[in-house]
Amino acid sequence: MEGNNDDDEYRRKAKIAVVAMVVLASIAVFALFVAFAYYCYIRRKVSMRRNAQKAEDANLCEKSDFANLQVVAEKGVKVFTFKQLHSATGGFSKSNVIGHGSFGLVYRGVLSDGRKVAIKFMDQAGKQGEEEFKVEVELLSRLHSPYLLALLGYCSDNNHKLLVYEFMANGGLQEHLYPVSNSIVMPVQLDWETRLSIALEAAKGLEYLHEHVSPPVIHRDFKSSNILLDKKFHAKVSDFGLAKLGPDRAGGHVSTRVLGTQGYVAPEYALTGHLTTKSDVYSYGVVLLELLTGRVPVDMKRPPGEGVLVSWALPLLTDREKVVKIMDPALEGQYSMKEVIQVAAIAAMCVQPEADYRPLMGDVVQSLLPLVKTQRSTSRVGTCSSFHSPKLSPGSISS
């Protein structure tokens, strides 16, 4: 009997142990479930908070951009209606087309007050077109120099985005260096003196962007077609849709995707995406070579070794005996060898493969000043005293 009691006691204890284990296991599973649910709840809350923050940040950015555009209107850059610009261009008549930009046609227009203007109709869909429009408005509303094309106003009406600039009667430098039969602007053969003056004024435009603005502005698409000429052949730098704010510290760079035009892009930028003001200096050197030689940056129809302008010209630029061979035949008899050697030396420095060996644009300006006739430089261009030095915030220009 005693043995049976022991067995019963053992079974009873075993049952209690099993029940206890089941209960404990159930509690553990329940605890895990609660912990998992709480984790999911916390994660969801964090995710919602992040999304809300992103939405708030985006909203703030939109408000900031909008506020900037409002300031633009108050500072003298006018907001036009689409109807006003439609009327100014004769309904965007084909007869008023004066240019073909990368993001749309450019029209000649006359405003209601009689002012002649150039109106860029940005018809490129997508983010890149939107970015270019935004950068042009944001940037040119802040920068003011006699060597930059002035933005007079803009229109952002539904899907229509238009930019209104001062009118430049003689179009782009490229049209005069390489005239074509169907050119919209009647090309004029540029003499040596005019080319030097254009080189100086374009250099002053980049000098302003690099050295009179904080942080500096890198144009990123400086080329002969983006140097516009007025009726007296004053030169102004235009087309800032790809512009980028440079680094605050000397010797720094900004990393960005490679954009620009073949033949003008600095080698280190093309290889690494590292962008500096020296990238613009290289592009300027290519334009200087165009002014000297009358050749396009890339022309693979030329004899072997002459297809890429920089590669062909660079070894000849510093050779006194050979430099004359690269000169544009149309300039024969207009220049002194002393002037040619000086300009060729500047061009050679600007297109150095190593960015550190290239000069600052301020140095280029100082080197060109003595070559431009005094009476032309004082009557055709303004002085550095007319510059403003605006502070730009990194958020104001993006790409």
Image (cartoon, rainbow, N blue to C red):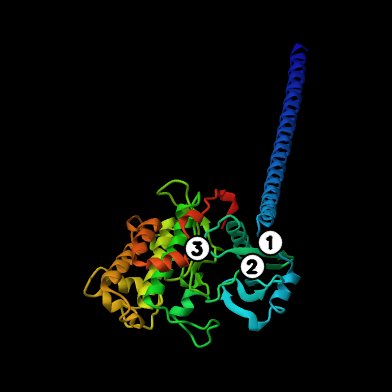
Which quarter of the picture shows residue 129?
bottom right
* Crowd class of label 1 (few under 14; some 14 to 19; many from 20; radius 10 Å): some
The residue that label 2 is drawn on is 164
Q: Nearer the viewer, residue 348 or 189?
A: 189
**Which structural element holds mark 3?**
loop
Residue for badge 1: 78
Q: List the residue tagged with mark 3.
A: 147
Q: What secondary structure is found at the residue carrying circle 1?
A: strand
Alpha-carbon span between mark 3 and mark 1:
21 Å
Is residue 365 left or right of 22 when viewed as pictured?
left
Q: Amino acid at mark 1?
A: Lys
Contact check, label 1 and label 2, Cβ < 8 Å: yes
Q: At which x and y percent is residue 272? A: 42, 58
| Distance between mark 2 and mark 3 Cα atoms | 17 Å
- The answer to whether residue 269 is visible is no
Badge 2 density bin: few <14, some 14–19, many ≥20, Cα 10 Å: many
CA gap between label 1 and label 2 equals 9 Å
Amino acid at pointer 2: Val
Disc on the earlier residue, 2 or 3 = 3
Report which quarter residue 317 is drawn in.
Answer: bottom left
Q: What's the amino acid at mark 3?
A: Tyr
Task: Say which residue appears at 76% left-offset and 25% top-offset.
Answer: 19
| Residue 294 in picture, x, y percent from top left | 38, 78
Q: Give the percent coordinates (x, y) of residue 370.
A: 34, 63
